[in-house]
Amino acid sequence: MRSDLDLELVGLTKRYGSTTAVDAITHLFPAGTYACLLGPSGCGKSSTLRMIAGHESVTEGAVVLGGRDVSRLPPARRGTAMMFQNYALFPHLSVVDNVAFSLRMKHVATSTRRARALEMLDLVDMTQLAERLPAQLSGGQQQRVALARALVTEPQVLLLDEPLSALDPFLRVRMRGELRRLQRELGITFVHVTHSQDEALALADQIVVMNDAQIEQAGAARDVFDAPATAFVARFLGSHNVVALPDGMAAIRVDALRVTDAPDAPLQGHVTGIEYQGTHVALTAQVTGKQEVTVLLTDGDFFGAPKDAGEAISFVWEAAAAHPLRGGGRTNQMKPNGEYTT
Ligand SMILES: Nc1ncnc2c1ncn2[C@@H]1O[C@H](COP(=O)(O)OP(=O)(O)OP(=O)(O)O)[C@@H](O)[C@H]1O
């Protein structure tokens, strides 16, 4: 069901001179969704986000929020707010004044804006440090302030450009939990740009995979991971083998392949590598058609019948575990000998 606060991109296009950064993408973000725009460097994620925010002009198409075309409105009048990668805090303003800044621009009375800023700081657990300057905060704390500052305008959509990339790995995992909690509490739409598959899978209700200025696949995080539609998506999300089978290309998860002794197994070859990963063992093999596959075996399965590099090995899988891939882009070209190019 459509809601008053859905965000829609309609044929959205961005060209910089002769470069098409975003090529006529159409997509609906239902209100209250945590969406991740995921894709490799240069695929057009940030340009898309900046067009939604109004920090970049739209070349063609429209950004529609709650049924209203906001494509030509200034950022402050769209109902969106953006949190930048480098947080962009004002160094000479205290934490609370940084958060209240946009309300000052809107001529909100001093006492009201201070109260609202403190409310937002409470939401991100930063009330204690309200009078500090940004330079006196850790990276994680600066990020919370940047979040509070973006949320103080009560946006319907919060746009986050690589919000976790400046944090160390430990803090990154903690902050992603915080982001998810905040989004649930506020119930607004978050559109979060990342090139990290793990981050997208951990956070998103909806994943939008971009490649080469276009949307390659979009859907619920689990659906996209379980059934990648193209070789690009399967490879980009990882944990999948992309294999050429007699009836076409298919993606098979690394944990769906089973080692077998059956002489007529559909994939046969020899072991090329074994990596012990604690709970699992990742075994790589070169199989039919010079293809490399990886299989993730439980520690028990592997050590129950260990293999050495160079040994013959064969694989089977449940029919439902092989997801046929549609051809597409430049990423799924099969050569006549059954090899594929990337
Ligand atoms: N201001 C600009 N002028 C010219 N070309 C640009 C400009 N901004 C981006 N581009 C180009 O547009 C394409 C998409 O860039 P964009 O920043 O949207 O990608 P991205 O997916 O966000 O990449 P990254 O993950 O590296 O930030 C790239 O080819 C980039 O070089």
Image (spheres, rainbow, N blue to C red):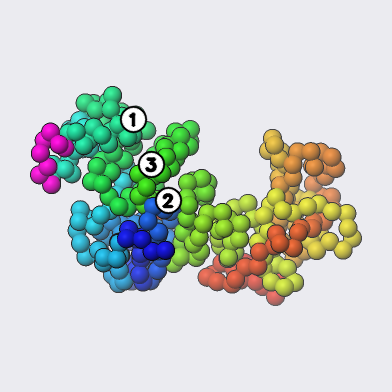
Residue type, numbered disc 1 = Asp
**Which of these two is toward me, 222 or 18?**
222
Give the residue number, with chain letter if any, for mark 1.
Answer: 125
- Image spot of residue 161 (x, y percent): 36, 49
How far apart are the two marked residues, 2 and 1, measured between alpha carbons? 21 Å
- Image spot of residue 93 (x, y percent): 18, 33
Number of other residues with Cα within 10 Å of mark 1, as a class: few under 14, some 14 to 19, many 20 or more: some
- Left/right placement of residue 342 relative to residue 111 reads right
Start-end of magenta stretch: 106-113
Q: Is residue 184 magenta?
A: no
Q: Tag 1 or tag 3, which sits nearer the N-term?
A: 1
Query: Quarter-wise, where is residue 67 in the image?
Result: bottom left
Nearer the camera: disc 3 or disc 2: 3
How far apart are the two marked residues, 3 and 2, measured between alpha carbons? 12 Å
Give the residue number, with chain letter if any, for mark 2.
Answer: 34
Residue type, numbered disc 3 = Glu
Q: Is mark 1 within 8 Å of ligand 1?
A: no
Q: Tag 1 or tag 2, which sits nearer the N-term?
A: 2
- Marks 2 and 1 close (CB-CB < 8 Å): no
Nearer the camera: disc 3 or disc 1: 3
Q: Tag 2 or tag 3, which sits nearer the N-term?
A: 2
Vertical position of residue 58 compared to residue 119: above or below: below
Secondary structure found at label 1: loop
